[in-house]
Amino acid sequence: MTEFVLALVLGLLFALGTFLVLRRDVVRVVWGVSIISQAANVYLVTMGLLDGTVPVLEGHGEGAGAVTDPLVQALVLTAIVIGFGTTAFALVLTYRVYEEHGTIDLLELGGETDGN
Amino acid sequence: MTPDLWVLLALVGLPFLGAAAVPLVYRVLGERTAYFAALVALACLGLVGLLYGTEGAQSIDWIPALGIELRFYVDGLALLIATLASGVGVCILTYSGGYMHGEPGQPKYYATLLAFMGSMLGVALAADLITLFLFWELTSLTSFLLIGHYTTESSSQYAARKSMLITVAGGLFMLVGFVLLHAVSADALGTSTWALAGEGSMLENAGAMRAALESEGLLVVALALLGIGAAAKSAQVPLHIWLPNAMEAPTPVSAFLHSATMVKAGVYLVGRFRPLFLPADAHPGSLELWTLGFAALGLLTMTVTAILAVAATDIKELLAYSTASHLGLIIAGFGFAGHLGAETGAFHILNHALFKATLFLVAGIIAHEAGTRKISELGGLREDLPITAGIAAIASLGMAGVPPFNGFYSKEFLFHAAWETGAASGGLYYLIPVVAVFGSVFTFLYSIRFLMLFFGEKPDELGHVHSPPVSMLAPPALLATLAAVVGIGGITGTFDVPLGPLEEFVGNVIHAVEPAGAEETAFHYYLPTTVTPWAIMSGVTIVAGAALYPQYGRLHDGIRSLLRGPVRANWWYDTATEELNPTSTAVRDRVQNGLLRTYATWVSAAFVVLTFSGYLATNVGVPLPTEPATYLPLALTGVVLVAAVSVFGDVSLRTATAVASVLSLLAVGIFVWAIFGFGLAPGELATQPPVVFVLALAAVAGIAVSRAPSHIAGVLTLSILGFMVAIFYILRDAPDLALTQLVVETLVLVIFLLVLDKLPAFYGGWNRGRMARDGVLSLAVGAVVTTTVLVTTAASPNEESVIARGLAEASYPEAGGNNIVNVILVDFRAFDTMGEIAVVSMAALSIVTLIALRERGETR
């Protein structure tokens, strides 16, 4: 049941992300990429195969059979950190593009590379 | 006696090791690396010598799961090709020492030549279809590098591309044929196998394989696929066009690859598969599918390319067409059923390699010493190059098929086989011997033309021609001597003193290409002593050739005037490739025009189309919820979303409030209806409300981001989305993710604000048409994602094989950690984490560079 809501929300977030990526403003493109990667992370977490408790064990490792899927969590944790790195890089790149070209309008920037 | 596995591995491996050592050796020896390479080839020849007298297969496992082995098989045919590859290799590499003096790119040249030799040895010895294919394509690859040796010349590039396209494409056809044979072998042998020769192989059970192929109606298909592969490699009409261009390579390469060895790979394949497709009781008159296909292909190639050779203006071009023509002769020979066909093919492989490699080396001497390769500019070279003239005479008379030179005997076998086949069926089939004679007349003509370069008057423009160095003269002399010995063997054979070892050697080759159970007869060759139809055919060829030779110039011009437009196979190739260029440019300009949105549009559209067609093709059903309770949170989400759209939409506050209140009332109504109408307990409805609520808020935040009136508003709402995702992680039992997400969101917010401070307030507007198009595309992407999430979450794979379960259970005993996610990150998958840290450090370094460089005043 929650899966159905989740599917709708993820679809909506991907649609919004795609829409933003298609904008002229570089900052909006960065937002779009950010939204898409957030949505992908959420999707991955829900794709964990096991349902159960928090994957933190007590004492000497009892209850390992009842935890939720720790592997996707590890993967997504890596993805979040890398997403942070790329977002920061994209932002600074945007800043640099503005410094170089004096605009953050992708139409204008694209036209410029066309001319070269 | 079966061959020793170590000898086989050493034989195939040694040239590759030598190739790897070449760059180092070149530093020490310089141009004398040629002799190092020749020594490697000599060692290989010695190893081939060790294999004489052995027969059988040896194998080691390669990919056991797929039944693929590294399997080698030794028999007469394999030994012949291996001897040619290593023996001619020695001559060529020695010759290169003189020829390549002062040329660029020598380390690459010698390394590639050695690698080629190893691949060719691999082709000769491989008996597993996949191993064979591997070495087969390696020869194409090394040939590509060698043809394109002069990397800056556009004609070299064109030639290398052409040969690569044709031979590799042909190889792919062959691969499909191999896979087909593999599939059929399951029916024929009980278990499917890739083994071609040796125990439990396809050739050992040729009868069963043939029956299975026929019963499944795949005989023609398999034959055609293998035939295309062989024809592409062995330059058969109409795929012969790459061979004349391949003459762009340095002459030793042409002599080695494009006359004696690589082009023999296709011929080898035909010989190797001959016992599989020809029944043991096939006789010249039985006209199997095999005969119809390959004899026709061979004779056609032999005739067409012999005519083209007469039209050639360059000596290497002449030799290239002549090579294609002689390969046609060999294919035709293997095509004829019965013993005579096998004799033709097997013996001519040897003879052709001897005289053609010699002639190429002679052509190399002429080009090197006279400075031109134009036939019209050359003549009377005998005065300056007497030894070379003698060598050329032996080789070109052999090529012409004049008795008692070596080519005569194998051509006599062809005439004999052609006659027998024609006579057995009668009627129109008499065309077979007629075509064979017709083609041979042209062979005679161009052979004599080549020889006449050394006779007649020397043109005045041709200055003094130097004598070649010994290293360039000795290899062709050796090869010509061997050709002469074969010829003399025929003379002595006539008087019952045959050349025993040679006849036995060729006899073994014939045995290898004959179907199992065929009648065994010893191989002998000699000059004709009685008048037979085939002796008359030889006579007619020589007399007609001699009579036509004075008209050579007119023939040459006449053929050239006919070669225009679509008559030339090259026209088709050039037109096809040139027409593709503008198409690809047009596609590129459309898909990648420098605008980010164009790239994104194409990628998203491709994603939508491909995924949806995948779902349609596989008939995936979308699992829709059936219980009414499911629709309640759904309705609630819908209400919230519509409300959000209207709030953030371009409507007045009053309208938005009105819509939101109507929707809220509606939602409450649905709940009331569910509780009283269906009797659902409120607790049941409340099982997952927090998650639904958080997701709905995240969606609202997403909508707000995309409609944000300013950068600051957008960043703040983006943060709300991020924090909602963090709460979602908490609800899904992932505290580590939630912590990370919170930290990252905070940092991203700070960075955004820092950067936005420096950016202009540009928000960009679009016209409504574009907005609508983007909206439709975005909705399509969203629909695909929703479907995918529904489909994937509904499927549940085998719980037994879940990796995560194993990791969770191993966490404490193996790593002593209670937090399984932490253990995975820092212990089980620590290298992934290291990669992740590397990515973050790279990003940090790039950021510092981008900002610091700017501040130092650099503009680019």
Image (cartoon, coloured by chain):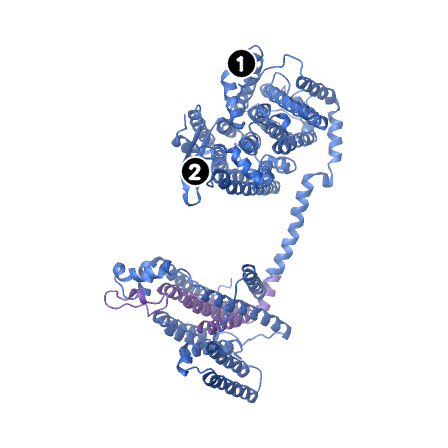
Measured along the vertical axis of the image, is residue B334 above or below residue B706? Answer: above
Q: Quadrant of residue B775?
A: bottom right
Residue under mark 1: which chain is it in? B
Give the class, few, some or many, for how many residues have Cα within 10 Å of label 2's Cα (few <14, many ≥20). Answer: some
Q: In this rendering, does residue B164 appear at all?
A: yes
Q: Residue A52: x and y, percent?
A: 34, 69
Colour seen for chain B: blue
Which residue corresponds to mark 2? Answer: B70
Secondary element at tag 2: strand
Q: Residue B802: x and y, percent?
A: 37, 60
Q: Residue B320: x and y, percent?
A: 62, 32
Secondary element at tag 1: loop
Looking at the image, tell me whether mark 2 or mark 1 is earlier in sequence order.
2
Measured along the vertical axis of the image, is residue B305 above or below residue B411? Answer: below
Pick the quarter of the image with the N terminus of chain A.
bottom left
Residue closest to the eye, B565 or B2: B2
From mark 2 to mark 1, how far is it between C-alphas? 39 Å
Q: Residue A104: x and y, percent?
A: 54, 70
Residue A49 shown left or right of residue B343 in the figure: left
Residue at image position (52%, 83%) is B643
Measured along the vertical axis of the image, is residue B213 above or below residue B342? Answer: below
Q: In this rendering, does residue A103 appear at all?
A: no
Pick the quarter of the image with the C terminus of chain A.
bottom right
Residue under mark 2: which chain is it in? B
Q: Which mark is residue A10?
A: none
Q: Quadrant of residue B379?
A: top right
Give the class, few, some or many, for how many residues have Cα within 10 Å of label 1's Cα (few <14, many ≥20). Answer: some
Residue A39 shown left or right of residue B496 in the figure: left
Residue closest to the eye, B19 or B239: B239
Which residue corresponds to mark 1? Answer: B498
Colour seen for chain A: purple
